[in-house]
Amino acid sequence: MPATVLLTLCLALGGISTLWGATPLAHAQLPDPITEESSAGNDASATLRSAVREDLFATVGLTCVFGPGVAEADARRQCLLKARTRLVAKMSERVAAAAASLGLSLTDEEIAAYTLGVVRMEADREEVEPGPEGLTVRLAGRGVADMANLAQKLPFYVANADVRASAVAQYRAARAEAEAARRSAGDPAQEQAGKIRRQMQDTARFAERQLRLGMSQAEVLGLLGEPSTSLQGAPDENFLCLGYGDVWAVFENGELACLRTRLEYHRRHESQCHCSGRLATILLGVEPR
């Protein structure tokens, strides 16, 4: 009898031990939720990153030859300007294709102006070789442009004439500088790009020293001359912007309200011609509103 009881107890304990031993196996067969969620999170982050930026890359390589009268700094700058012009031409094709697919009507100049505004150029290699006939500059570079959200940005660009006008004005100034560099590559006494750049910088410094808030448009024209471009503010505001290369004179109700280095679109004004925005762009006059 005791032996029978002992055998029964052993069998019972063995069954319980088997049940306890089965528990870890059951847990081991369950999927790991943390691993799956982490993987899903990584995929979501990758998707978000790809949605934020869509960079377009283009490369350029060229050799520029200059006469003996061109300084090295001017030669390097002129060659860089030529490289930038080629990169903008390459990348404009992508913008033109996007505009056509959206049914938007833009001129070649407006497309190039938009592209210039989003492209960033980097020089990967630059060699300057002096010689008896002048300087030879060899440049290899690349352009990077953020082409994300073109479906939203391009319609906005098309719908806002003042945004396009400001972009085109900046593009024309850059093109004139590059064209002058191309024409005067061996003749520093003629229309060099470096000379144009210095003139633009001199005009900006002169304006900052001589202009005063409250001046009339006639007084500013008397000091700076006729502007290279002009831009009207929003229809319900009385702003007028006169462009002088590197500086903009902004008038409100016929009086000089501020002097700034560049125009920026502001939602409150629904225009680029105003005195709001980043203080870093305002040389004279800070908007109190």
Image (spheres, rainbow, N blue to C red):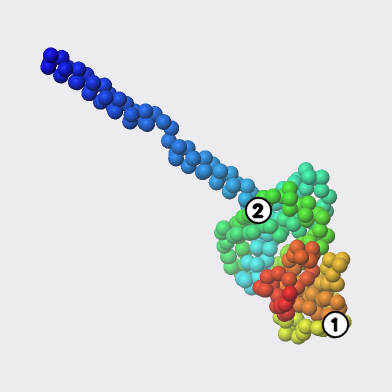
**Which residue in the structure is indicated by mark 1?**
216
Q: Please tell me which of labels 2 and 1 falls first in the chain.
A: 2
Camera-side residue of 288 and 4: 4
- Observer able to see residue 61: no
List x then y, in percent, for residue 61. 63, 55
Q: Which numbered disc covers residue 146?
A: 2
Q: Quadrant of residue 182?
A: bottom right
List x then y, in percent, for residue 125. 56, 59
Q: Residue at x 71, y 69 (%)?
A: 277
Residue 226 in the figure: left or right of residue 263: right
Report crowding for label 1: few under 14, some 14 to 19, many 20 or more residues within 10 A (C-alpha).
Answer: some
List x then y, in percent, for residue 75. 65, 68
Q: Residue at x 82, y 45 (%)?
A: 103
Q: Is residue 45 above or below residue 183?
A: above
Which quadrant is home to the N terminus? top left
Residue 214 in the figure: left or right of residue 278: right
Camera-side residue of 12 and 192: 12
- Observer able to see residue 47: yes
Mark 2: secondary structure: strand
Q: Which numbered disc covers residue 34?
A: none
Q: Is residue 200 above or below residue 175?
A: below
Amino acid at the residue labelled 1: Ser
Amino acid at the residue labelled 2: Asp
Report the label total: 2
Camera-side residue of 229 and 39: 39
Outermost residue toward the front in this view: 1
Q: Residue at x 73, y 71 (%)?
A: 276
Which quadrant is home to the C terminus? bottom right
Q: Quadrant of residue 145?
A: bottom right
Q: Quadrant of residue 169?
A: bottom right
